[in-house]
Amino acid sequence: MAESDVVIQITVPEAVVLDSFLRRFAETDELTIQDQAEQQVLWNLQCLFEKLTDREWPSIESASAVLRGEV
């Protein structure tokens, strides 16, 4: 695993709900929470990322530039 990789672990039910949420967004281009389970999965992910904040994170601008292929 590369030093710049972030690995998170989620349960199978969380993965199913998250996949459904992301597929709906990809198909409709609307990012809306339609179910309490979707909200819970997003909160769970946020908590997982909060646990990783002891590392040095790039700024949102820097991370966005990398994802756009500008760096």
Image (cartoon, grey):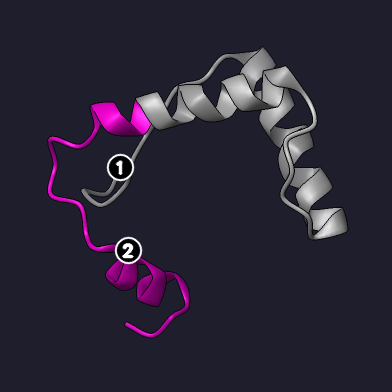
Magenta-drawn stretch contains 53: yes
Q: Which residue is drawn at 47% across and 29% down?
A: 45
**Quick check: 9 above or below 50?**
above
Sequence-earlier tag: 1 or 2? 1
Q: SS class of the residue under badge 2?
A: helix
* Mark 1 closeness class: few <14, some 14–19, many ≥20 residues within 10 Å: few
Which disc, if any, is residue 1?
A: 1
**Quick check: 63 above or below 51?**
below
Question: From this viewpoint, which residue is outermost toward the bottom?
Answer: 70
Nearest to the observer: residue 24 or residue 4: 24
Q: Residue at x 37, y 77 (%)?
A: 65
**Quick check: 2 above or below 14?**
below
Q: SS class of the residue under badge 1?
A: loop
**Residue carrying label 2:** 60
Which region is colored magenta?
Answer: 48-71
**Quick check: 25 above or below 46?**
below
Going by the numbered disc 2, the residue's amino acid type is: Ile
